[in-house]
Image (cartoon, rainbow, N blue to C red):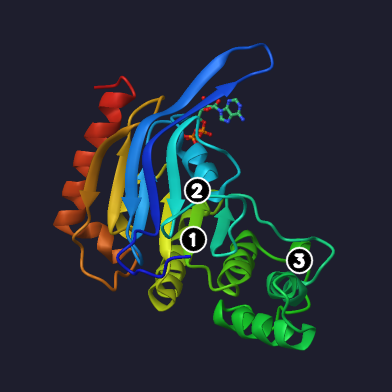
């Protein structure tokens, strides 16, 4: 395995992905898709509904294999589930029969940590995400925002080098969502991980990312890439009122509108 820090965290090279349904119908989700994500970068992906955003994440995780082209993680071809990759999806992956600590400790245990050490790590992360006092609570006793905090602790406790997020905050109310975005930026800044963050919310994409990749309608190709030159640390929601932010939002919205046939 290469340790060359110049190697991109993720590299998709001329990737296409075709699905064949049970009735023999073919759907081309991605076509000639090429993009790299540099190490430590926060990359957001936006695009019309159904264009292939989640498919892109599945290719990086190894859940799907490209029909043509190659997908590499840290310079190596993707081959099955990679323990260096962490995920946060829209739906929480919290076991309802386990309390908060045991949910967070599950990852380190699975990775071979001693039970006492796994619990210690879980406790530290539960505190870190602001859930001190809720260690023995179960999923149904937590709010949506608290469950999302558990998801972040479950992910970051494993020190992922790559973090894939698929609309992680879309089910939250606006206020909780803003708080969670702030929280995520702080965790990411401390972790040094590379992030691919899929969202329908282009303002969320601009507020969080170093780079916003705008995809075309299906089959998805890269339509445009925006380097987001807003200083860090960024604080929500203030960053959204900056002139530069508004200019990015206007431009990306125009790109998306053209592809959604509204232009
Ligand atoms: N396993 C599958 N079998 C057949 N078709 C699939 C499969 N997975 C995805 N697709 C199709 O591929 C296309 C891209 O799906 P994908 O979920 O990647 O889009 P998306 O951009 O994430 O969508 P959304 O914005 O609605 O979340 C869609 O037309 C979808 O129906």
Residue matched to label 3: 141
In the displayed structure image, the side of residue 32 where residue 1 appears, left or right: right
From the image, state whether disc 3 or disc 2 is nearer to you. 2
The C terminus, quarter of image: top left
Q: Position of residue 204 (x, y in %)?
A: 37, 53
From the image, state whether disc 1 or disc 3 is nearer to you. 1
In the displayed structure image, the side of residue 148 where residue 197 appears, left or right: left
User: Alpha carbon of mark 3 to alpha carbon of mark 2: how far?
Assistant: 34 Å
Q: Is ligand 1 within 8 Å of the beta carbon of the residue shown at mark 1?
A: no
Residue matched to label 2: 60
Q: Position of residue 127 (x, y in %)?
A: 60, 83
Please tell me whether mark 3 sits on a helix, a strand or a loop. Answer: helix
The single residue placed furthest to the right in the displayed view is 97
Q: Position of residue 115 (x, y in %)?
A: 78, 83
User: Alpha carbon of mark 1 to alpha carbon of mark 3: how far?
Assistant: 27 Å
User: Alpha carbon of mark 1 to alpha carbon of mark 2: how far?
Assistant: 11 Å
Q: Residue at x 36, y 41 (%)?
A: 13
Q: Position of residue 87 (x, y in %)?
A: 56, 57
Please tell me whether mark 1 sits on a helix, a strand or a loop. Answer: strand
Q: Depth check: 131 or 211 in front?
A: 211
State yes or no: discs 1 and 3 in contact (Cβ < 8 Å): no
129 above or below 77? below
Disc nearer the start of the sequence (1/3): 3
Q: Depth check: 122 or 260 in front?
A: 122
Q: Residues within 10 Å of mark 1 (few under 14, many from 20)?
A: many
Q: Is residue 112 visible?
A: yes
Q: Residue at x 48, y 67 (%)?
A: 161
Residue matched to label 1: 163
Q: Quadrant of residue 242?
A: bottom left
Q: Is ligand 1 within 8 Å of the beta carbon of the residue shown at mark 2?
A: no
Q: Depth check: 18 or 181 in front?
A: 18
């Amino acid at each position: 395995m290469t340790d060359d820090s110049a190697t991109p965290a993720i590299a998709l090279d001329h990737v296409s992905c075709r699905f064949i349904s049970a009735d023999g119908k073919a759907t081309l989700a991605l076509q000639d898709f090429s993009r790299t994500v540099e190490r430590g970068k926060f990359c957001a992906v936006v695009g019309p509904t159904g264009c292939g955003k989640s498919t892109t994440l599945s290719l990086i995780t190894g859940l799907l294999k490209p029909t043509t082209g190659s997908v590499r993680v840290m310079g190596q071809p993707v081959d099955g589930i990679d323990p260096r990759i962490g995920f946060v999806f829209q739906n929480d992956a919290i076991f309802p029969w386990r309390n908060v600590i045991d949910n967070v400790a599950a990852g380190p245990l699975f990775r071979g940590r001693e039970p006492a050490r796994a619990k210690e790590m879980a406790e530290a992360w539960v505190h870190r995400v602001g859930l001190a006092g809720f260690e023995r609570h179960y999923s149904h006793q937590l709010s949506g925002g608290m469950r999302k905090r558990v998801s972040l602790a479950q992910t970051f406790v494993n020190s992922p080098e790559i973090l894939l997020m698929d609309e992680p905050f879309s089910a939250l109310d606006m206020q909780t969502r803003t708080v969670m975005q702030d929280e995520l930026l702080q965790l990411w800044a401390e972790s040094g991980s590379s992030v691919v963050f899929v969202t329908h919310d282009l303002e969320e994409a601009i507020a969080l990312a170093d780079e916003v990749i705008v995809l075309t309608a299906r089959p998805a190709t890269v339509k445009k890439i925006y380097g987001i030159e807003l200083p860090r640390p960024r604080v929500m929601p203030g960053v959204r009122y900056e002139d530069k932010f508004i200019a990015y939002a206007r431009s990306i919205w125009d790109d998306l509108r053209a592809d959604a046939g509204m232009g």
